[in-house]
Structures are given as C-alpha cells and as structure tokens.
Image (cartoon, grey):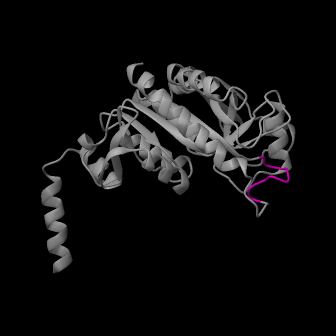
Amino acid sequence: MINRIKSELINLGLKFINNDEKIVRIFLETAPTNVNEIVILPTTKLVMKKILNKLENKNKKGYVYNGIINGVRVSVIRCQMGCPNMAILMEVLKRTKANKAIRIDFCGGMGGLQNNVQIGDVIIPKKTYCGDGTSPQYILTNTSLSTQLKSINNPRGQFQNLIAGQTNIYLTSPNESISSILYTKGKALYELKVKRTNLWTTDALFCETQEFLRTLSSIEVEAVDMESSIMFLMGILSKIQTSAILAVSDLPGTEHDFILSNQIHPEMESGINRAIKILINSLPEIKSS
C-alpha cells in the first residue's frame, strides 16, 4: 500500500513537468534551471575535489555544484568513467541552458612519438578517434554524421584479425575556439609541459595489449582516454561547445603503466594541478568566446 501511494504521488508530480525536465531530474536530481551555461566535468574523485576547492560561493543542487571560479559562474558535475556515462550526461546537459562543457581529468600517454609525451604533461586534444562502443551507436542513429565526420579503416587490422569491433573508426574534434584558448594559456604558463596531440578513446581500460599500443603508434596517437570521443560527438549533436584538458597519468606499456605498477608517479598530481590552473586562467576568455 505504501509503495502504491508513493508511486501515485510520483506519477502525479510527473504530470506537471515535460520529458526533458524529467530526464534532468532523474540523472541530476535537480531542475534544468540549476545548471549554468559553462559546465566543468571531472571524472575522478581526486580531480572533482580539487575543482570544488576552487569554487567560491559554492552551493549544491542534487549532483550539481554551482559557484564562481575566477569571476566566472560555472557548474561542476562529476562524470563517472567511460563513454556510456558521458553520453548520458551530455544528453542531460542538452536539456539545460549549458552551452559550453569542458572535461578535465587524466589520460594515458604514448611516449617516444612526435611530442615525446611524459607523465605530468597537459594534453589539449586536436582530434579523437572513436575507439569506444558508444559513439557508433549515435552515428547509426544520426546517419548524417557519417558524412560529416572523417573516418579511417580500423588500424588495429594491421596487427590482429578483427574478429569483433568496428571496421571503420570515426574521428571527432573539440570546439577549436575553446581548445585554442586552453592551449595558448597553457603554453604561457607551462611552455614545455602543454601539448596538442591526437587522442584515442576506448571503453576497455584493461585491454591495452601490445597490439593496441602498436596501433596507436602507427597513427601517431599520443594519448588515450575513456570519455572524450562521445563528448565531442554529442557536442555536435547538442550544439554545446566542448573541449578537454587532460593530465598524463601514466605511459601504458612501460614501467610507468598505472594498471601494472603499484606506484604513483610523482609528476601525476603535478600534471592535474597544472591543468586546473590553466583552466582557471582560461575561464574569463572562454566565457566571452
């Protein structure tokens, strides 16, 4: 009886809101109006805590933290790991007044290539290969994307039989204006530590085999993450300007591989501190862009 009463009360409340507001309330536990135009999206608990420590006049509405950073009003929402979680969050954001979203967190780095990426470096992605499983679903649903986006034959086919997965890999890009602001501010602060590279997004954190790493090297990919491809893709669909600023946490396939090592590299936290400082310094210009 109690559950039936609760269900009837919930259904009564849902009659007074539209579907878009319902989706926002389900996932963020707040109203769409409580999300600001600029949204910062950390993934890990460490980065979320660091960003919230910079937030002035902080107040919490459901899963949304609102406040001011460097004179700019922002919302901070933690996105859980992986493209499916980022896709849900971007679906939610397009139903709010958000028009700019910036992902800030960690990525893996590929050393020994053009930029000689090292742990502690800050990466501003140029373009992202959709090696994840979520982006293809959105491309199938929104078929016009297949002609808008560049694609290549899956380079993993050079190193192993493609018994599963995609035969074509699509590429997505962040908003160039925001990315250029982040890169310019970053180079002014940490000239040798800030780099623009290509990125590969994967859902399979524990599947970074030697064949996978050789694939990345063959196409000059110097960073790996788990969220950016779908974020940039859905930025196109939702007309939200997106970008990312990522600190290199480890070098897969080396002694500094985070999954295989039981030690944290001393430059890992320094890298994310650099990324946060760059973002903070960039916010006023991002707001006006």
Q: Is residue 252 magenta?
A: yes
Q: Is residue 65 left or right of residue 147?
A: left
Q: Is residue 4 left or right of residue 257?
A: left
Toward the viewer: 234 or 57? 57
The chief SS type of the magenta part is: loop
Q: Quadrant of the C terminus?
A: top left
Visible residue check, residue 161: no
Q: Is residue 256 magenta?
A: yes
In the image, residue 216 sits, relative to residue 65, either above or below, namely above
**Residue 180 at x, y percent in the picture:** 56, 20
In the image, residue 196 sits, relative to residue 117, either above or below, namely above
Toward the viewer: 279 or 228? 279
Residue drawn at 41 percent across, 47 percent down: 77
Toward the viewer: 171 or 180? 180
Q: How many marks?
A: 0
Q: Quadrant of the N terminus?
A: bottom left
**Residue 182 at x, y percent in the picture:** 55, 26
Span of residues in magenta: 251-259
Residue drawn at 69 percent across, 30 percent down: 198
Q: In which quarter of the view is residue 147 placed?
A: top right
Residue drawn at 75 percent across, 35 percent down: 222
Residue drawn at 78 percent across, 46 percent down: 251
Q: Is residue 117 left or right of residue 159?
A: left
